[in-house]
């Protein structure tokens, strides 16, 4: 763990136009030490009266930070099933590799949540 360095991690939530959810990060920003594990969550709520399934897709900025951002647990790894009006906390366990280049001081983790529609 690099106790001498702090990196800002920003968390962003986006919804696909076809996704009937409320979706937001529990933490908008965290200060983290590279090499240490951190946990946060995103909150999602199904706004419909029917069961639906969603899938989150993530993006990291700047792009070169991608190979240094390690997600150990993430709701984006699997489809998320919601009952009618159901809400849930969806966790992320992550670490930033201490080898992150020193010129990168902020990393933005952005998720877009899509309504999953299986192919017919």
Image: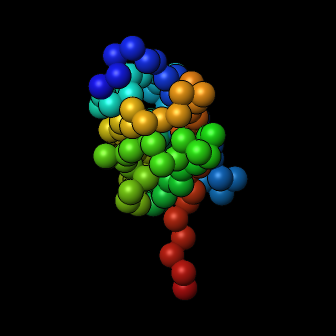
The spot of residue 110 in percent (x, y) is: 57, 41
Q: Report the number of discs.
A: 0
- Residue most toward the right? 17
The answer to whether one can see residue 26 in this image is yes
In the shown orientation, is residue 48 left or right of residue 2? right
Residue plotted at (66% across, 57% down): 18
Q: Is residue 102 above or below residue 31?
A: below
Residue positioned 38% across, 28% down in the render: 34
Q: Does 85 sit above or below residue 120?
A: above
Residue 119 in the image: x percent, y percent? Answer: 54, 81
Query: Residue 5, position in %: x, y?
Result: 43, 18
**Residue 39's quadrant in the figure?**
top left
Residue 14 is left or right of residue 40, and the answer is right
* Residue 13 seen in the figure: no
Name the image quarter holding residue 98: top left
Residue 96 at x, y = what percent? 41, 35
Quadrant position of the N terminus in the picture: top left
Residue depicted at 52% across the width and 65% down the height: 116
Does 34 sit left or right of 14 as displayed?
left
Instruction: Give the answer, above or below, for where 25 lies relative to 67.
Output: above
- Between 112 and 22, the one lying in front of the other is 112
């Amino acid at each position: 763990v690099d106790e001498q360095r702090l990196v800002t991690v920003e968390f962003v939530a986006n919804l696909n136009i076809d996704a009937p959810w409320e979706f937001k990060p529990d933490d908008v920003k965290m200060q983290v030490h590279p090499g240490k594990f951190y946990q946060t969550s995103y909150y999602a709520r199904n706004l419909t009266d029917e069961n639906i399934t969603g899938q989150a897709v993530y993006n990291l900025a700047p792009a070169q930070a991608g190979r240094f951002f390690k997600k150990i647990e993430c709701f984006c790894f699997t489809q998320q099933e919601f009952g009618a009006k159901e809400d849930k906390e969806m966790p992320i366990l992550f670490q930033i590799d201490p080898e992150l280049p020193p010129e990168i001081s902020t990393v933005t983790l952005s998720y877009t949540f899509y309504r999953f529609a299986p192919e017919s």
